[in-house]
Amino acid sequence: MTLITNKKCYVCGGLEFSNGHTVLWQELIDELQLSHSEVSYINAQQGNSCLSCGSNIRSIVLAKSIVSFLNTDLLLKDIIKSQLSSNISLLEINEAGNLTKYLREFENYRFGSHPEINMHSLPFEADSFDLIVHSDTLEHIENPKHALSECYRVLKHKGALCFTVPIIKGRMSRNRAGLSPSYHGDPQRHCKDFMVHTEFGADIWALVIESGFSCVEIHTFMYPSGIALLATKD
């Protein structure tokens, strides 16, 4: 089914979106104790996508936060053809879905995959990057506040971190220590890298502030499915 909305894709400008596939499975729904409405908007976040470029809602809202940081009216697909992409040093941690193929076009682009690059100890000097991007990675990190503080350390003055995490908007965040192991990804493969250490809720902004950032913006797209955070280093 095609959804035609008044929303514009921040990656390519597309106006039509697929009413996509289901991504949650019953075991995970039960572990997270999700309501019907929570299941619906989480499935939409991952499963609904722009018919023009294929970016899902998670990627689109992340692109929106990047566009906001760069203070431009350009779409992401046009930013990579502009001078902006030459002026920005960018670190992508893990692949940010469909955005990776665009981010790689930035002239000063670096990529690091966790856990090969440890987010608790990023192998970069302080003040190295203008922009750091990661998507649905932080929930798999044992100490997310420390990982955020590492992002803060390697950002330049006035640099920014743009990221997403799965957010259950009507709850507060909780650490899963002491609970049964929960995994994202393939429901048939309980890979250690996909283990969930933190379930994030409406207080995610506080964790960002506590890690050193003093300014946090929350960007949305087809809320509550799409939520991204933009944290700036003053």
Image (tube, rainbow, N blue to C red):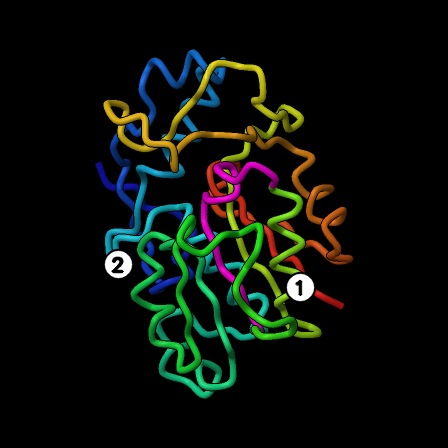
Q: Left of 7 or right of it: where is 51?
A: left
* Residue type pointed to by label 1: Arg
Residue at left 58%, top 75%?
128
The magenta stretch is 130-143
Q: Which mark is residue 153?
A: 1
Tag count in the figure?
A: 2
Secondary element type, mark 1: helix
Q: Position of residue 221 (x, y in %)?
A: 49, 47
Left of 187 or right of it: where is 103? right
> Which mark is on residue 97?
none
Q: Tell me the element at label 2.
A: loop
Mark 2 lies on residue: 53
Q: 159 or 143: nearer the eye? A: 143
Residue 13 place in picture, x, y as percent: 36, 63
- Residue 140 among magenta residues: yes
Which quadrant, please, contains the N terminus? top left
Closer to us: 202 or 37? 202
